[in-house]
Image: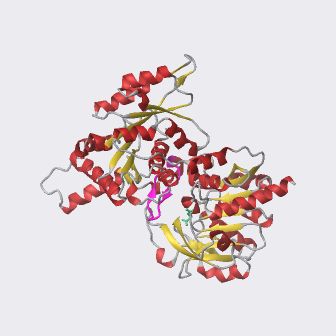
Amino acid sequence: MSRFVFITGGVLSSLGKGITASSLGMLLKARGINVTIMKCDPYLNVDPGTMSPYQHGEVFVTEDGAETDLDLGHYERFIDTNLTRYNSITTGQIYSTVIAKERRGDYLGATVQVIPHITNCIKDSIIRVSNINDADVTIVEVGGTVGDIESLPYLEAIRQMRGDLGRDKVCYVHVTYIPYSKAIGEMKSKPTQHSVKEMRAIGLAPDLIVCRTARSLTKEVKDKISLFCDIDPEGVLEARDVDCLYEIPLEMERQGLAEGVLKKLKMQAPEPDLEQQKQIVKSFRSPHQEKVKIGLIGKYIKVADAYLSVIEALRHSSIGHNASLELIWVSSEQIERDGAEACLKHLDGVIVPGGFGDRGIEGKILGIQYCRENNLPFLGICLGMQCAVIEFARNVAEMKDAHSSEFVDSGEYPVISLMPDQSGVVKGGTMRLGAYPCRISENSIAASLYKSNLIYERHRHRFEVNNEFRARLSRKGLIISGTSPDQQLVEIVELKNHPFFVGCQFHPEFKSRPNRAHPLFAGLFAAALEKMQTRLS
Ligand code: GLN
C-alpha cells in the first residue's frame, strides 16, 4: 500500500505548490522510491480544456489524451514520467461520477451527500492513482487555497485518509507565503498562522510548512512559525524566489524536505543521486555573453503561463549548447500594425505556438512569411503549422486568400479544414487528443532530428491539413515529412533550401524534458545559434 503526501496551500494562490510537489517527487525518485503525483482541482469544469489560457494558463495534454492543469507538466518534467488522465481530477469530474451513479441507482435508498459520497469518490480517485502506478509514495496536490469553500471536500477527504490508513501513512505539507512589510521592516508570519488555524478547524495539522518568501527567513520568524503552528523547527522550510525552476529541488534537498517527509512516513531510503540535476542547473547558470534570441509570436503574450511548456522546452534546448536563450515576446497584433520586418529582423529564430480563434492570425502568417523569405529559423506548432501551410498556399502555391475553415467558412482554398468525419462536433473533449503515431519520411529534417521513422506525439486540435490541396502544395515545394501511418493526416511539414523551417500538427513541447530537449526544439535552437554566430561575425 502506498503512502501519501498531501500538499495544500495557504494565504495566496500561485505560491508554487505544483513545484513543491514536483520537487519532492524528484527527490524521492532520486532515492529509488517509486513515486507518482496527482492534482485535485476544485473547479466545476470537467477539465480545463474549455477554459481561457488567460484564466488558467496552458492546458497540458497527457499521453492518453487528458486535458489537464499545467502542473501536470511540471510533474512530468520533474519526475520524468508520463502521467495519465487519472493523475488529474476536478470537482466537475467527481460530481459527474457521483451523479451518474445516483442515476444508475447505485446508492439506492441513501440521501446522496458531500460527506460521504463526494469525499469517498475523491478518496477512491486518489487510491486508484496510487494503485495504477504501484506507487510507494503518492503525492497529492490539492488546488486552491485553504479557506476556499470549493476546497473543503478535498480537505475533508485527505483528513479522513489519515484515519483510514493510519498516521504513519500520511504526511501533510502546507505551502504558505511570508510577506515582508517595508514600512515596518519585518517579515510577517501572521497570515501563515491564520492559515494553519483554518486547517486545524477542519481537523488537519501540517507536518511541514514550506514558506514562499522573497527574502531569507530569519531564525526569529522560523521559531515563531514552529511555535504557533506546532511544527518541529526543522519542519519550517523556505522557498525563495529563483530564476531557474530546476534549482528548487536542490534547495529543498539542502533544507531537508524529503528527509522530513520520509521521517514522518517512517520510511528508510538511500542517499539521493542528484548529479544530473546539478548538471542541468549548472548549464542554466553558466554565464554566456551571447544570447540566442528566439521570438515567440502569440496573442496571449501578457500571460507567460499560456505557453509554459513551450517556454520550458525552449529552455531545455539551450542546455548543452554554449549559449543562453533570450526569449522575446512578439505580439501577432503588433506584426499586423508595424509589419514583420520591424518586429522580427533582430531575431535568430521564431516559434509560433498553438492557439485558437482568429485574433492575430494575419500577424502570425506575415511573421511566417518573413521567416520563410529571410532564412530565419522557424518552428510552427499546431496552429503555427497551420498558419505556415496557409502562408505557403497563398504566397507560393498561388492559392489566393487560402485559409483555415476554422476562421473563414467560405473561400476557394480551405487548406486547413475539418476532416469529413468531424462535422457537427461539440466543444469540450472532442478534439484529437493525446499521443498518435507519425511516420517520418527518409532524408527529411524531421528524420535527421528524431533519428527514427516512427514517433508518437501528443495532439490537441480539431483542424487538419486538407488532403484536397496536398498534391498542389507538394508540387510547389512544401515537403510533407510526417504523416499518420495511413497517410491520411499531415503531421509534419518542412521546407528545403532553408536553414530550418518546420511545422508540426502535434505539440512537441509536452514531451520535452530538462535532460532531453525535444528534437524539434533542439533543431530550432541549433539553427538559431548558427544564425546568432553569423550575426555576430
Ligand atoms: N485551432 C486549431 C485547431 O483546432 C489549432 C489548435 C492548437 O493549436 N492547439 O485545429
Residue drawn at the location 54% of the way across and 80% of the way down: 485
Q: Which residues are magenta?
A: 55-69
* Residue 494 x %, y %: 69, 72
Residue closest to the eye, 221 or 480: 221
Say if 93 sits above or below 15 in the image. Answer: below
Is residue 57 a member of the stretch shown in magenta? Answer: yes
Give the left or right position of residue 178, taking residue 88 as reference: right
Residue drawn at the location 37% of the way across and 53% of the way down: 89
Give the left or right position of residue 193, taking residue 123 as reference: right
Q: Do we see residue 502 in this rendering?
A: yes
* Residue 336 x %, y %: 72, 55
Which secondary structure is most common in the magenta stretch?
A: loop
Q: Quadrant of ligand 1?
A: bottom right
Residue closest to the eye, 78 or 330: 78
Residue closest to the eye, 267 or 123: 267
Give the left or right position of residue 535, taking residue 67 as reference: right
Q: Residue furthest top?
A: 184
Residue drawn at the location 34% of the way across and 50% of the way down: 91
* Residue 138 x %, y %: 37, 50
Quarter the C terminus occupies:
bottom right
* Residue 449 x %, y %: 66, 69
The image quarter in which residue 133 lies:
bottom left
